[in-house]
Image (spheres, grey):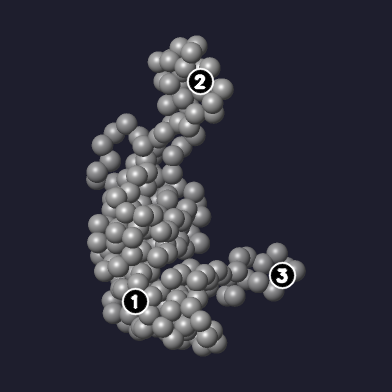
Amino acid sequence: IVASHAIRAVSISPDGTRIAIGTNGRHLQVVATPMLEQARKVHSLTIEEGGEEGKKIENDNNSSILIKPRILTEHSKLHLGSVYDVAWSDDSRMLATCSNDMMVKAMKIRHDYHNFPPNYDEDNTNERDVELSPVTFRGHDGTIRTLCFANGNQIVSGGAGDCHLRVWDPLHQTDGDGPLLSLKGHQGSIFSVQSGCASNGTSVLNPNT
């Protein structure tokens, strides 16, 4: 993937089917994760075209196989500033972004394309599987540097300004709504947030942490 601006954020969906990419050019792109069978096909064509010499180059120099990703969705100007972070919900059906425009945006993944067939040789322009009208949340007073999903489909975001964490619920809030909660404590910018995972019975960390 070659972007026209610096890539600032990358996140793979938990189900492994998509990669979300955010750039300094306010751009969000969602591409399909390359499939193993596609890599094998490209590798096979490379060997056939290069013959034994091509095979030797492949083995001796560990040359990379370049696979053009299938673009599922593009937002050319999703934010008013750089996309600082992207995050997926645990079920891979929601995607959230944040920016120095002090806004959080959340969008749903269309269920009918949640598991799409790997027809990589076809024109997939109709397979836009992310809603083009994301919900926008406002409430931060500085650059939002990081966000994650927690406690199901709630979003936790943090960054500069007053350095408070903020919690949002895209399933029950509407466009322009403020945060459900503001969590105080930090005196400097927050650069990363992460939620807990399902407990194995011995850890104190869980999706509510």
Image disc number at residue 203: 3
Q: Amino acid at mark 2?
A: Ile
Task: Kindly tell me whether residue 73 is visible in this rendering.
Answer: no
The vertical placement of 43 against 52, above or below, is below
Disc 1: which residue: 102
The residue positioned 69% from the left and 74% from the top of the image is 204
Using a 10 Å C-alpha cutoff, classify the residue at mark 3 as few (fewer than 14 neighbours), some (14 to 19) or many (20 or more): few
The image shows residue 46 at horizontal and vertical percentages of: 43, 21
Circle 2 SS class: helix
Q: State which mark lies toward you, 2 or 3.
A: 2
Compare residues 207 and 41 and report the one nearer the observer: 41
Which disc is residue 57 wearing? 2
Q: From the viewer's perspective, tell me whether residue 123 is left or right of residue 15.
A: left
Query: Is the C-beta separation of discs 2 and 3 under 8 Å?
Result: no
Between disc 3 and disc 1, the foreground one is 1
Residue flagged by tag 3: what amino acid is it? Ser
